[in-house]
Amino acid sequence: MTREVRDALDVRRKIVVLEYVQQFRRVTDGCRDLGVSRASYYRWRKAFAVGGREGLVRRRPIARRHPRQIPQSFVEKILHLRTQYHLGPQRIAWYLERYHGFKTSCSSVSRTLKRQGIGPLPRKTDRRAIHTHRYAKQVPGHHVQVDVKFLALVTPDGHRIRRYQYTAVDDATRVRALKVYRRHNQQSSIDFIDYVIEKFSFRIHTVRTDRGHEWQARFHWHVEDAGIRHVYIKPRSPQLNGKVERSHRTDQEEFYQLLTYTDDVDLNGKLAQWEEFYNLNRPHKAHAGKTPYEALRSMLT
């Protein structure tokens, strides 16, 4: 049955109701016989008086823009942040509010992505076991996690090269220090920890590493001589350095996959910019949208 036929039958039914009810002295009696409400009868009678049969045609609601619907310009920004940087709805909402002055909810961003045919981010298969206890020190510098990210880069002439990103993450604030080295040894580790001590604006109490060769005796005693305690995590327990491990995934998703390698000077320059952006401008989920430096300031005041 076509829409035109349905509309014609609906108009005919309303006319029958109007003609039938007019025979009664009391509108209530006629409406009761036909199972029609008085409100519907009076609405149809008024519509017929004003527009005749055309007035009885059911008007389809006009689609209107919901007052809370995200404007198209911000929809494009949401799609850019998801497709280029693989950000989740909560972090996208933080970015829009912080850098574009547009406040929206995580659920609104999720609905927008769904309408655009973009599903949720894939869950990692190596998610933390349910029984694992997650903790964070609340004093800046109490624990600093340090680790190395192995980089496989391609030079402009097509050669594959290895580089090593050394990373330090403060457990409490998530403030980070980053530096890339050509070699993966204790000398690089010593140079890096000196960089971290100079970079961090708070005193470091403990440095925590795995048991790799780059963190052995020379490095260990260099750290201890600087008045900093050096501890090793348990063997086969990378989750004990989970914050620095997780930050390496962020580096891969938000920095390295967008990087075109030219040379080491360019790489270190861009990495320094990324380090500054991460600490000063990037909202962090652990701090409910605050940046690491904002979290640091709140802990020191």
Image (cartoon, rainbow, N blue to C red):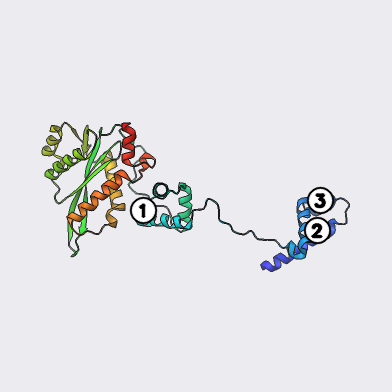
**Residue that protrudes farthest toward the front in the picture:** 101
Judged from the image, the secondary structure of the residue bearing numbered disc 3 is: helix
Q: Which residue is mark 3?
A: 32
Marks 1 and 3 sit apart, C-alpha to C-alpha, by 61 Å
Asked where in the image residue 4 lies, by quadrant, the reply is: bottom right
Give percent across and percent down for residue 242.
29, 41
Left or right, residue 110 beside residue 295: right
Q: Which mark is residue 17?
A: 2
The answer to which of marks 2 and 3 sits earlier in the sequence is 2
Identify residue type, mark 3.
Arg
Give percent across and percent down for residue 178.
22, 46
Task: Tell me if mark 1 has few (under 14), some (14-19) or many (20+) residues whose alpha carbon lies within 10 angstroms of its own.
Answer: some
Identify residue type, mark 1.
His
The answer to which of marks 2 and 1 sits earlier in the sequence is 2
Q: Quadrant of the N terminus?
A: bottom right
Give percent across and percent down for residue 236.
23, 41
Whether residue 134 is situated above or below residue 261 in the rendered picture: above
Left or right, residue 131 beside residue 20: left
Task: Tell me if mark 3 has few (under 14), some (14-19) or many (20+) residues whose alpha carbon lies within 10 angstroms of its own.
Answer: few
Q: Which residue is mark 1?
A: 86
Marks 2 and 1 sit apart, C-alpha to C-alpha, by 59 Å
